[in-house]
Image (cartoon, rainbow, N blue to C red):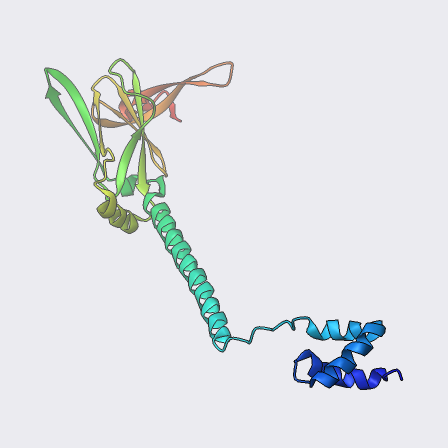
Amino acid sequence: MKTNCDIIRDLLPLYAEHITSEATNALVEEHLAECEACRAVLEQMEQPVPVRPEAQPDAPLRRIRAALQRRSIRAAIGSVLAALCALAMMFWMGTARVPATTEQAHFWTYNRKENGADICILEAQGEGVWLDMEGTFSWGKPQITVRAMRYRFPGVHRVLTALVGSDRSTVWVMVSRTQLLTVDCADQTLYYRDGQLVDRYIVQENPDGTFDYAYGTDQEYGIDYKKG
């Protein structure tokens, strides 16, 4: 009599674990020799069962630590960027420059002899004011031009200078008594000849629209020419 598959399949778990008697083993094996379906069920039972790893109890803590580390890195980067921006702003404020007015420049002029030559010296005595020369200096030039400049934020400039070194801006210029010294300021342009402040007069208008100028005092040119 052919053994019923349901009975054999009830015995297969015990058979697979080798805990059945020899008589039962013979009965099961006789059935398996003839039943392909039950053999397949036994093969499925004998395959290793995959074991899922148990969740680690500290996994949430690791995630929290990783999140805190990322937050700390972002905070550190933000702090570095903020410090760099502050330094850049301080450097800009410390070096920002604008033309100085004549009142801010507070000019002082005097004459002296040097190596047998008569020279004139103009000095900017205003705080934070210096003189930028236009082009290069030459004793042979009939006219020397300088610009009076100052720092927009003198307090910040003093701090920056204390941090990076001394300020090397030129506050005086030296010319010969025959050279015309032109000083461009924010509010006006000044002219010096022979160490004295003079005015500019229009002596002739040219066909191309340009002018010829003379530099002196009202006693010299004021009667015949107008200032310009």
Residue 183's place in the image compared with 204, above or below, is: below
Residue 19's place in the image compared with 121, above or below, is: below
Give the total number of marks visible in the rendering: 0
Name the residue located 15 percent from the left edge and 25 percent from the top edge.
Answer: 111
Which of 227 and 177 lies nearest the eye of the viewer? 177
Which of 48 and 131 lies nearest the eye of the viewer? 48
Name the residue located 70 percent from the left edge and 81 percent from the top edge.
Answer: 15
Which of 60 and 80 lies nearest the eye of the viewer? 60
Classify the position of the C terminus by image quarter.
top left
Give residue 151's position: percent from left, percent from top.
Answer: 31, 43
Give residue 173's position: percent from left, percent from top.
Answer: 23, 28
Q: Residue 1 falls in which quadrant of the image?
A: bottom right
The answer to whether 85 appears left or right of 195 in the picture is right
Q: Residue 83 falls in which quadrant of the image?
A: bottom left
Residue farthest right in this picture: 1
Residue 100's place in the image compared with 18, above or below, is: above
Give residue 204's position: percent from left, percent from top.
Answer: 42, 16
Which of 40 and 3 lies nearest the eye of the viewer? 3
The answer to whether 166 appears left or right of 90 in the picture is left
Give residue 84's position: percent from left, percent from top.
Answer: 38, 51
Residue 57: in sight, yes or no? yes
Residue 35: in sight, yes or no? no
